[in-house]
Image (spheres, rainbow, N blue to C red):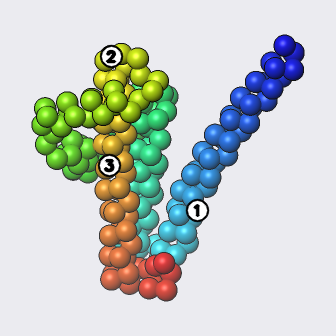
Amino acid sequence: LAFFLLYMVRQRLRWMEGLKTKIWMIKRKVELTSFLAGGFIIGNEEKAQRTRHEIYRWLMAAFFFSSSARSTHLSQYSVSDLLHAGILSEDELNILVRCMKGPGQTNQRERLSLEEALQTGREIRSVQEAEKKVECLRQVDSCCRARDRLLWWVQVRILAACNEKILEKEHKK
């Protein structure tokens, strides 16, 4: 029994270490992108500072949306909290809210996704659990749409910085 308990504890510790490693890797990529954007977008004029600031804000918001659907701590915060924190402007918030709603979902599609969840989910034991699972998948999908929109904004802003001669073309990649 002691060996079994030791084995289970080691399994949990490996899982926890793997999760921490994945989170650090994602965080490192976001920080690296921020440092690169700050290093290559040079100048103290207002255009360059505004460009850096917009890229940083959008990267932080994208990081929030990447993690919020799967984190119980971040799921406490809503999109409007990003507005209050100064990460998004009101216009950006309105665009993201519309983007998160996605294309119109019909009742037939909702029924199909519920039936799919009931058929494919082995761990689902009731309709209530299936509905929770479908709602979780919808939340993940809407957060992914918002994240993708923000990253697209970053890409467009970098291209605009090249056109405005704030960023040299060889540093764009």
Q: Which mark is nearer the camera, 2 or 1? A: 2
Q: Amino acid at mark 3?
A: Ala
Work out whether 97 lies above or below 50: above
Q: Label 1 amino acid? A: Leu
Q: Earlier in the sequence, mark 2 or mark 1?
A: 1
Foreground residue, 139 or 118?
A: 118
Instruction: Give the label, 3 or 2, closer to the camera.
Output: 2
**In the figure, is residue 146 to the left or right of 169?**
left
Kindly identify which residue carries mark 1: 32
Residue under numbered circle 3: 146
User: For the view shown, which residue lies furthest in the top direction?
Assistant: 1
Disc 1 element: helix
To which residue does mark 2 refer?
Answer: 128
The structure residue drawn at horizontal position 74% and vertical position 31%, both measured from the top left corner, is 11
Q: Nearer the viewer, residue 51 or 160?
A: 160
Label 1 vs 3, first from the N-terminus: 1
Name the image quarter holding the N terminus: top right
In the image, what residue occupies the spot 16% across and 47% down?
103
Q: Position of residue 38 (x, y in %)?
A: 52, 67
Of the two numbered discs 1 and 3 in the rendering, the one whose residue sits closer to the viewer: 3
SS for callout 2: helix
Where is residue 100 drawn, in percent x and y?
26, 44
Residue 83 located left or right of residue 8: left
| Residue in the picture at 68% in, 35% down | 15
Looking at the image, which residue is at 38% across and 60% down?
151
Kind of element beneath mark 3: helix
